[in-house]
Amino acid sequence: MKYYGRLIIPLLITLALAFSKLYYGSITKDWEGIWSFVPHINTVLIICGFTWCLLVLLQILKRIFIKQYDISQEDNLKARKVLTQINILVKVANFVVILLGIGLILISFESVRKVGVGFFASAGVAGIIIGFSAQKAIGTLIAGIQIAITQPFRLDDAVVVEGEWGWIEEINLNYIVVRIWDLRRLVLPTTYFLEKPFQNWTRTSANLLGSVFLYTDYTVSFDALRQELDRILETTSLWDKKVKVLQVSDAKERTVEIRILVSAKNSPTAWDLRVYVREKMIEFIQKNYPESLPKTRVEMFSAKISSE
C-alpha cells in the first residue's frame, strides 16, 4: 500500500498540473515579469512528475513479479534466474526513463533547444568525440543487459572470482558485488565477468562434489577405509546420499594419495562435509592404523670387517 501511495498522489498532482497547463495555456502567454516563468516551471514539474510515476510504477511491477518466486526455498534456481533478469532490466529501464526525463527538461528551455539544433547540425566531429568519451559507459550498460539475457551467473550464485569464494549479492548496471565467505565484499565492474574467466558452482544446480585428500603409508587397508567412510556418511545429515567414492589417486615414493569424493546439496554444506570427513578419517587412521601414517624409512646395515 505504501508503494501505491507513492504512485497515486504524485500522479494526481501531475495530472492536475497538466490540466491547468491545458486549461490556462492561452492566458499565461500574456503574463509578464516574474509570472512569465510560471508556465515553464509548470512544464518542468509535469515532466518530473511523470518521470517519478514511471519509476515508481516500475518498482511496483517488479515487486508484483518477485512475489511469485520464493528465493528462500532450497531449490531456487528458477527464482534466482527470474529475479536476476528483473533486477537488471528494471535498472536499465530506470536509467532510460531518467535519461529521457532529463532530456525533455533540457529541451523545454529555449536556449538549450537552440544549442541542440546547432549541435545536431555539426554532429559529425562532436558525435565522434562524445562516442569515444562515452564508450566505457555505453559498454558497461550493454554488459549489464547482456548479463540479464545470457545469465552467466544469478543472484546468490556461488562463484570463485580473483581467487576468492563467495556469493553474488548485488547485480548493478556498472558493478557486481560478491559477498566473500568471511563477509568481505568484492566489488567488480560488470564488464569483468564478460572478459575474464570465473567459476560458477551453482550454474545449473546447487549440488556440488567435495574432495578430500589423505596421505598414508603403503600398509594401510583400503577396504577398512571404505567401510569407515560409509559409516561416517551414514551418521551425518551433511551428505545428500548421492556420491561417495574412495580411490587411490596417486602413489609416490613415500606415501599413497587417497582421494575421497562426497556430494552435498550446496557449496557451504559441501565445505562442512569435507572438513567433517577429513577429521573423522584421520581419527580412524590414528586409532586403528597408527603404523600406516606417513613415515620415512631408514635401513641401516652393519658391515663386517675382516681381520687379517
Image (spheres, grey):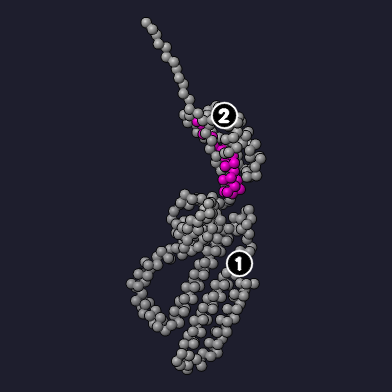
Examine the rendered structure and indicate whether residue 271 appears above or below residue 87: above
The residue nearer to you, when weighing 97 against 41, is 41
Neighbour tally class for label 2: few under 14, some 14-19, many 20 plus, Cα within 10 Å? some
Residue at 61% over, 72% down? 3
Mark 1 or mark 2: whose residue is earlier in sequence:
1
Q: Where 35 sits versus 287, above or below?
A: below
- Measured as percent of width and height from the top left, residue 243 is found at 60, 41
Q: Is residue 179 above or below residue 209?
A: below
**Is residue 37 among the parts visible in the rendering?**
yes
- 51 inside magenta stretch: no
How far across and down, in percent of the image, does residue 128 sit? 35, 69
The amino acid on which the numbered mark 2 sits, given as a three-letter code, is Pro
- Front-lying residue, 286 or 63: 286
The image quadrant that residue 132 belongs to is: bottom left
As drawn, the residue found furthest toward the left would be: 125
- Write down the region rendered in magenta: 255-277
Secondary element under disc 2, as helix, strand or loop, is helix
User: Which amino acid type is shown beneath numbered disc 1?
Assistant: Arg
Tell me if 296 is positioned left or right of 277 in this view. Answer: left
User: Residue 242 versus residue 278: which sits nearer the camera?
Assistant: 278
Q: Residue at x 57, y 84 (%)?
A: 16
Q: Are marks 1 and 2 in contact (CB under 8 Å)?
A: no
Residue at left 58%, top 51%?
205
Mark 1 neighbour class, 10 Å CA radius: few under 14, some 14 to 19, many 20 or more: few
Tell me how far mark 1 sits from mark 2, CA to CA: 60 Å
Residue 63 is marked as 1
Q: Circle 1 — which element?
A: helix
In the picture of the structure, the residue carrying the numbered disc 2 is 290
The picture places residue 167, in percent across and down from the top left corner, at: 54, 54
